[in-house]
Amino acid sequence: MNSFDPMAAVVDWLDAYRVADLSITNFYAREAVLECGCNRVKTLGGRSAIAEFWRLQFSEKPAGDLVGLRFEGDVVAVSYETAGGSVEALLTFNRDGKIVRSCCQPLGQVGSLVPA
């Protein structure tokens, strides 16, 4: 029986972001893809590129309070405050409880994040 709780994992992911803990990369699968549409669209693959992304995020856009958390199909949508405004991220997990795809954009931006 799988005891993985995606909602709890997302809360832990956001907590790691909020305290600027690079262990946030441990939430990602080795083959994970991260897409960020918060400034200009970037698509990154692999844990080293994702780690570098988070190093910059920690200093440029630290996370604040949780705004919302919900399931959207088979992904978890989490919205939260950053220094640059509210952001929504969609996190898709594999069966092992690791993020395989992460997509973020400013909350309320025209056009929905659509998981592949």
Image: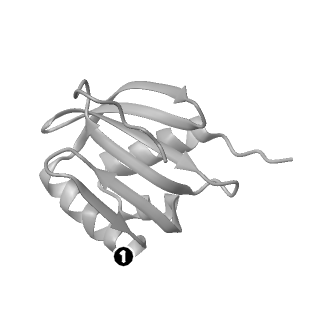
User: Is 9 placed left or right of 65 in the picture?
Assistant: right
**Tally of numbered discs:** 1
83 over 32 or under it: above or below: above
Q: At x 60% / y 40%, what residue is drawn?
A: 6
Q: At x 49% / y 64%, what residue is drawn?
A: 26
Image coordinates for residue 47, horizontal then vertical, percent: 42, 72
Image coordinates for residue 81, horizontal then vertical, percent: 24, 32
Name the foreground residue: 107 vs 51.
107
Look at the numbered disc 1 and give the secondary structure of its residue: helix
Image coordinates for residue 111, horizontal then vertical, percent: 29, 30
Q: Which residue is mark 1?
A: 48
Image coordinates for residue 107, horizontal then vertical, percent: 26, 28
Name the foreground residue: 100 vs 13.
100
The amino acid type found where label 1 is placed reads: Ser
Colour pattern of the rendering: one colour
57 over 110 or under it: above or below: below
Q: Residue furthest bottom?
A: 48
Q: Quadrant of residue 24?
A: bottom left
User: Is 57 placed left or right of 24 in the picture?
Assistant: left
Q: Residue furthest right?
A: 1
Q: At x 13% / y 53%, what residue is drawn?
A: 60
Circle 1 Cα neighbour tier, 10 Å, few/some/many (<14 / 14–19 / ≥20):
few
